[in-house]
């Protein structure tokens, strides 16, 4: 049990760190744009807020509460539309930001309490209103846990639980994104008899899933902390006009995400 907890914790931390690296996602754009403004506290709070949402989605996905997904799925279109409004609001605020040369002098951090407030709420809502996170984290967790288990590490049977969760979600949602189905076909060989000890998590499922979800969230926060420090430390190297263009572009991309989510929500409500 101890060995499984240590392994699942390390795997969770690395998964959270690595899968948070792409800068194309809404939370990455939110943190990057505010880090370029020198808002260190805002960025850290946004990362922690998003981690709370990540923990919830990951815990449910890995634990195997597929019954929750059955009830959750009909609400997805409406969550998408509400999330799109929130994204458009944040995107517009970022787009309208204009920095002055004195705002980026050296490694100056913006300590203004008013300008740094709201980070936790923004991060929390941004991820909670992104229903694709449930499937995204389930897919990435399935790939990661299955791969580590295939290398001979003791995952306490979590590899089989997650594999079973993916198959159940595919049955519930056959017409949704094909990413889960693709992942299942590509990585089925990782769950073959090479390590078929038929481990079970039974009563340990809550503990193992909780450790994995917690350390994954922690890995995500750690990545965004490092990213924030790096951007604030080096942003003075950029021309202020170029910096303003980058921030405006990030705001437009966030608005683009909002429009896309609104379109997906409307399509699911009226055309499916």
Image (tube, rainbow, N blue to C red):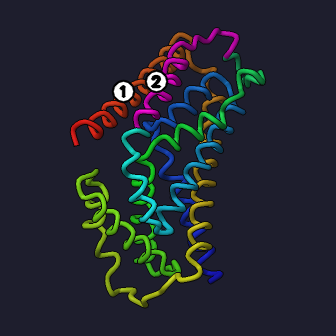
The answer to which image quadrant residue 207 occupies is: bottom right
| Residue extending farthest bottom | 197
- In this picture, is 112 found above or below 197? above
**In-image side of 53 versus 113 (left or right):** left
Q: What is the secondary structure assignment of the residue under circle 2?
A: helix
Label 1: which residue? 259
**In-image side of 41 versus 73 (left or right):** right
* Residue density around tag 2, few if under 14, some if 14–19, many if 20 or more, within 10 Å: many
Which residue is nearer to you in this view: 256 or 169?
169
- Residue 132 horizontal/vertical position (percent): 40, 47
Q: Give the main secondary structure of the magenta stretch.
A: helix
Find the magenta span and give its range: 80-103
**Which label is found at residue 88?**
2
Evaluate if marks 2 and 1 touch, with contact meaning CB atoms under 8 Å apart. Answer: yes
Which one is earlier in the sequence, the residue at label 2 or at label 1?
2
**In-image side of 181 versus 2 (left or right):** left
* Residue density around tag 1, few if under 14, some if 14–19, many if 20 or more, within 10 Å: some
Q: Is residue 83 magenta?
A: yes
**Which label is found at residue 35?**
none
The answer to which image quadrant residue 225 occupies is: top right
Which image quarter holds the N terminus? bottom right
**Separation (CA) of disc 2 from disc 1:** 8 Å
- In this picture, is 191 found above or below 41? below
């Amino acid at each position: 049990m101890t060995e499984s907890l240590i392994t699942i914790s390390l795997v969770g931390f690395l998964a959270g760190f690595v899968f948070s690296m792409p800068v194309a996602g809404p939370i990455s754009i939110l943190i990057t744009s505010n880090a370029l403004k020198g808002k260190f506290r805002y960025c850290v709070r946004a990362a922690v807020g998003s981690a709370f949402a990540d923990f919830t989605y990951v815990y449910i996905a890995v634990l195997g509460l597929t019954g929750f997904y059955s009830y959750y799925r009909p609400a997805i279109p409406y969550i998408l539309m509400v999330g799109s409004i929130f994204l458009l609001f944040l995107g517009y605020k970022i787009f309208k930001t204009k920095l002055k040369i004195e705002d980026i002098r050296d490694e100056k951090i913006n300590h203004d309490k008013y300008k740094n407030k709201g980070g936790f709420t923004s991060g929390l809502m941004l991820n909670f209103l992104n229903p694709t996170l449930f499937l995204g984290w389930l897919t990435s967790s399935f790939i990661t846990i299955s791969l580590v288990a295939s290398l001979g590490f003791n995952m306490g049977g979590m590899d089989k639980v997650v594999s079973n969760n993916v198959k159940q979600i595919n049955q519930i949602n056959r017409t949704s994104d094909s990413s889960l189905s693709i992942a299942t076909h590509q990585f089925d060989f990782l769950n073959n008899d090479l390590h078929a000890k038929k481990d079970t998590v039974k009563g340990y499922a809550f503990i193992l899933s909780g450790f994995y979800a917690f350390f994954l969230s922690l890995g995500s926060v750690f990545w965004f902390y490092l990213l924030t420090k790096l951007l604030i430390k080096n942003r003075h190297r950029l021309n202020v006009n170029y910096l303003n263009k980058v921030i405006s572009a990030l705001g437009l991309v966030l608005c683009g995400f909002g429009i896309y989510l609104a379109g997906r929500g409307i399509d699911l409500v009226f055309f499916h």
